[in-house]
Amino acid sequence: MCQRAETSLQCRPLSVTAGRHFVDKTLAAWGAVTPDPASSAIDDVLLVATELVGNAVRAGSRPITMVVETHRDHIHIGVQDDSPGRAAIRPVSQDAAGGRGLTIVDAVSDCWGQSAYQGTKWVWANVRIAKGSVLATDCHQ
């Protein structure tokens, strides 16, 4: 891991925006702005963050922990919630107003998954970044 930041969010709808802003400001502070090669992936990272926090808010009841980490070739977003339900891509009708969060995460991330539930669980996703990003400069083997 190169860099890591963590925040705690209340389990309420306003936290979706707060989580997205946390990731955006953190990555910008770390240097992922134009013309850095990672800047082209920021929209996907923010979309993933939005969907993961949104799912945690809908499923959970206690505060949510969110982490953002950079690695040599990807940005990792993790969200911890207290819901015992497994995160899963579910079929959704075309006229449904929601329910596509993990389908979106699956489409824009390199990979995603979750930890086993033990009072809480982590749902996470990795978004690949281009080589040469400032985000990887402080990485150690």
Image: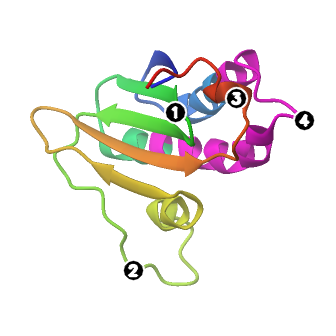
Report the magenta residues as a range: 25-53
Q: Distance between the residues labelled 2 and 1?
A: 32 Å
Q: Mark 1 points at which residue?
A: 71
Q: Name the residue under label 2.
A: 91
Taking depth in this image into account, of 74 and 12 the one nearest to the observer is 74
- Where in the figure is residue 116, as x and y percent of width and height? 14, 45
15 above or below 42? Answer: above
Q: Is residue 83 left or right of residue 5?
A: left
Q: Which residue lies furthest to the left in this view?
A: 118
What's the residue at 16%, 45% (across, down)?
A: 84
The answer to whether residue 51 is seen in the rendering is no
Q: Distance between the residues labelled 3 and 4?
A: 16 Å
User: What's the amino acid at mark 2?
Assistant: Pro
Q: In this view, does 107 lie to the left or right of 90?
A: right
Proximity of marks 2 and 3: CB atoms separated by less than 8 Å: no
User: What's the amino acid at mark 1?
Assistant: His
User: Can residue 87 be found in the magenta stretch?
Assistant: no
Q: Name the residue under label 3.
A: 24
User: Can residue 38 be found in the magenta stretch?
Assistant: yes
Q: Name the residue under label 4.
A: 35
Q: Which circle's residue, 2 or 4, is located before the other in the chain?
A: 4
What's the residue at 48%, 47% (across, down)?
A: 126
Query: How crowded is the residue under tag 3: few (<14 C-alpha within 10 Å), some, or many (20+)?
Result: some
